[in-house]
Amino acid sequence: MHLFLLGVSHRTAPVEVRERLDFATRGLDHALGALAARAAAAESVVVSTCNRAELYVACGNVRATREDLLAFLSDYHGLDRGSIEPHVYEMADGDAARHLFRVAAGLDSLVVGEPQILGQVKQAFATASTSRTLGPVMNRVFPWSFTVGKRVRTETALAEGAVSVSFAATALAHKIFGELKGRTVLVVGAGEMGKLTAQHLKAQGVDRVLIVSRTLAHATSLAAAIGGTPLPWQDLDGAIGEADIVISATGATLPVLTRPRIEGVMRGRRNRPIFIIDIALPRDVDPAVGDLEAVFLYNIDDLEGIVRENLSRRASEVERAEAIVGDEVRKFETWLTARHAIPTVVALRQRFDAIRRAELERLMPRLNGLPPEVRGRVDEITRLIVEKLLITPTEQLKSTPDPERVRTYADALTRVFALDAEDAPRPAGREEAAPFDSADSSEQRRTAGRDADSGKPVNP
Amino acid sequence: MYTILFLLYALAGGAYAWHFATRRASAGRTATTLLAAAALAHTFAIGMQTMAAGHVPIAGTTAAISTFVWLLALAYLYMEMTTEERALGVFIVPLLVALQVIPALNPVAERRIPVLESPWFGVHVASLLFAYASFALACVIGITYVLLFKEIKAKTLGFFYARLPSLDSLDAMNRRTVAVGWAFLTVGVMVGAIWAAQVRGGPVSDPRLQAMSLADPKMLGAFLIWGLYTFELYSRRLGWGGKRTAYLSAVGFLLILFNFVPIGYFLTRSHNFQ
């Protein structure tokens, strides 16, 4: 069984292509259903965000699956295959796992380390789970990727520091005021930028938003939109006196918040700290205001500077994050390699069991004279002998980390025991084997069950 | 024994520095465990001395310093548990290590001094040591407040920005520790004054008793310290808060250290019970 991935992302496809390949609009479950109907893939998970559309499948034959997935993409979206193929990337086994781990860790995101992607991958997995398109490989690799994502976030600074202006402003507000609950925000000017930042702060727990604009009607409509209190322009000084955070975003050409003005207000505040965010261009706040004792003044350039710094700090963490991913990919590869041995192990067990049952049948006439519990005992003993004989080769085969050697061992076993031969001894008709029938079928089920979850203890 | 304690505190200090630099949770747990172990060993040591001397070892300046280190370690551990904030350990524990140097280099056995045979003595010293421990915390909190304040003000968000709690919570912690310290300081000074007045008229005569007046540097220092912290508490009503009270806390504790160590060893005539 192979892990195979085929998809497009912001790295390979422009937005026009990505939006046409989006699976989210019709629902992931719909896509999973359509994919399962084609039977190319034994297991499948579809990850679809605005930056990527990826099909993760477990399959026996990579080449055939690749063709089928490409055909599925063009059929499902009603697109010409030639228009998709140049943008598509594909990976198998360890490489596919590496890609998934990098995606979950936020390493493949447009903004490195962004937090949403892990949730989106988890959602994709949950949808596949309810659509019943999961199997042993997907059930292993996806939860593994969640662990990798978490490891990268806790062990590196990849996801640290705000990387957008409004997040940077909010983070600063938190560092100054702690909890924002019970704080007052004043928005000066009724423009779009002020609105966005105020909404952001409101989402962080600020309960009181005052809005002052030169045109009271603008303030009133913005106040209605975000749930604040509009105030007339002449109340500006009083509003600054009450506010903890001031967002200034007027269209004025000259500074609105001058130093004498803020100085006057600060006297009334008894030096209670105030955080002034000047996001207007040209600036609304006289830079000299920042020299006042309890004033923290940040303008749009300062905030963008913080964002740039955080981005470069994240970039410097990429190497450590990649090391974690590489580490986990190696563990995953060992597990996947062990799975390659499974068909051989199953065939070997079937062969041994077939021989055992054939022999029991041959001896049936003589055994028939025995009481039923003794016959049961004979069956039990022969089964245990076969088990014991198989334990060591099975363990050896499954714990070999090198895929080449696994293949060599599997080949050798296949030849030595002629596992692919058709004329192998088969058990005789079921009605004759009546005394051992129940033992036989339950044993087969047990073997199959054990093999299905035979993952080595490489627990992530 | 003091040397072992010193080494334990030094180890804990190293672990706090390691935690502060790397921000690894495992380093933080190690640091707390080491400090708790040091404080526990210290508790044991003080318990032994108490049994030997019949009272808690606080009579001599050296013993009092060691007891103070122990109290500060406990107070800090309590603060760490209640606030779940380990960032301040890197500032506090070095202070413990530095102070513990004195008893480690100069160990003295606790002696019984007749004039100190009074329950008032225990109350007097214990409340003052508690007060000093609180002020030490307030000082460290104040220093970190100023460091963070300057970083945010200068728009160079970096080391402290990533590691310290918010200005608001530092300010609240400062207010609380100063209030607690002030209460203990007031009780300690008042008990001392009343008790000194009582024993002076009593049967025991001791030259040190005659020196108990504001003219003695140690006692003058104590009143200055009390005045400073009273002003700090009052200044919050004037709307000071924040950076100014942070500076006051730092100055106040420097004064305490000066009064405790050099004055306690070399200058005072009233409080030399070595």
Image (spheres, coloured by chain):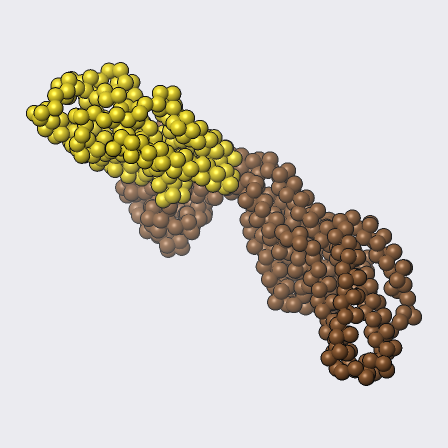
Location of residue A98 with respect to A416 vertically, above or below: above
Quarter of the image where one finds residue A123? bottom right
Of B51 and A168, the residue lying toward us: B51
The quarter in which the N terminus of chain A is drawn is bottom right
**Furthest-left residue in this view:** B201
Picture coordinates of residue A174 (x, y %)? 41, 42
Quarter occupied by residue A156: top right
In this rendering, the answer to whether A413 lies above or below B81 is below
Q: Which chain is yellow?
A: B
Instruction: Examine the rendering and report whether any part of residue A44 can be seen.
Output: no
Does residue A14 lie above or below B122 as drawn?
below
Horizontal arrangement in the rendering, residue B36 relative to residue A122 (left or right):
left
Residue A170 falls left or right of residue B173: right
With respect to residue B28, does A413 lie above or below? below
Where in the figure is residue A371, as x and y percent of width and height?
Answer: 76, 83
Residue at left 64%, top 63%? A128
Left or right, A393 with reference to A21: right
- For image coordinates 41% across by 26% down, the residue present is B3
Q: Nearer the viewer, residue A288 or A165?
A: A165
Task: Find the residue positioned furthest to the right.
Answer: A423
Pick whichever, A251 or A431, lies toward us: A431
Q: Judge from the rendering whether residue B59 lies leftward or rightward of residue A180; answer left or right.
A: left
Q: Residue at x 75, y 49 (%)?
A: A401
Where residue A27 appears, as percent x and y from the top left, is 62, 64
Instruction: List x then y, in percent, for residue A251.
Output: 42, 40
In the rendered image, which quarter is residue B235 located in? top left
Colour of the chain lettered A: brown
**In front: A441, or A100?**
A441
Residue A383 seen in render? yes
- How many tags in the picture? 0
The residue lying at 12 percent from left, 24 percent from top is B204
